Amino acid sequence: QVQLVESGGGLVQPGGSPRLSCAASGHIFSINNMGWYRQAPGKERELVAGIRNSGSTNYADSVKGRFTISRDNAKNMVYLQMNSLKPEDTAVYYCNTFISPMPALVHAYWGQGTQVTVSI
């Protein structure tokens, strides 16, 4: 069994810089791509940022230059550093990873989500 646990959300003022963390635990042989998604009320879930095993990253246009995704392979963790937050960044943020619990088998796993609210 694999679990993803996110942390770091909460109420943040505009311009704030919180960091989200996601820890993967359980039966893990290897971790492939990792990423962060978000879902705002009344909107579809969207990709915010992704990071591959190689370290290459990709970002939604709306967060480029403000958010930075990183990973610590030794700790099975992925992070999202968010800077210059705007009210439109308010959403539930979800960690998503592709994990191999054994060789030649890959599953996508989701965290439970962490609320980020940007407001005065």
Image (spheres, rainbow, N blue to C red):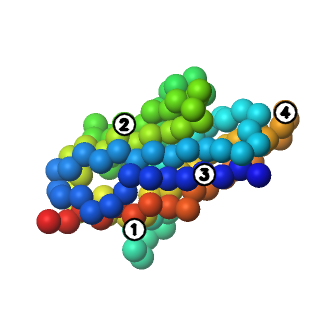
- Dot 2 amino acid type: Thr
Local secondary structure at mark 3: strand
Rounded to the nearest angstrom, the CA distance separating label 1 from label 4 is 36 Å
- Dot 1 amino acid type: Ala
- Which tag, 2 or 1, sits closer to the chain's start? 1
Local secondary structure at mark 2: strand
Taking the spot 39% from the left edge, 64% from the top edge, the residue there is 115
Please tell me whether mark 1 or mark 4 is closer to you in this view: 4
- Residue 37 % position (x, y): 48, 54
Instruction: Report if the CB atoms under discs 3 and 1 are less than 8 Å apart.
Output: no
Residue 40 disc label: 1
Going by the image, does 86 lie left or right of 38? Answer: left
- Which tag, 2 or 3, sits closer to the chain's start? 3
- Which tag, 3 or 1, sits closer to the chain's start? 3
Residue 103 disc label: 4
- Dot 4 amino acid type: Pro
Residue 58 disc label: none
Instruction: Report if the CB atoms under discs 2 and 4 are less than 8 Å apart.
Output: no
Give the labeled residue for mark 2.
Answer: 68
Rounded to the nearest angstrom, the CA distance separating label 3 from label 4 is 20 Å
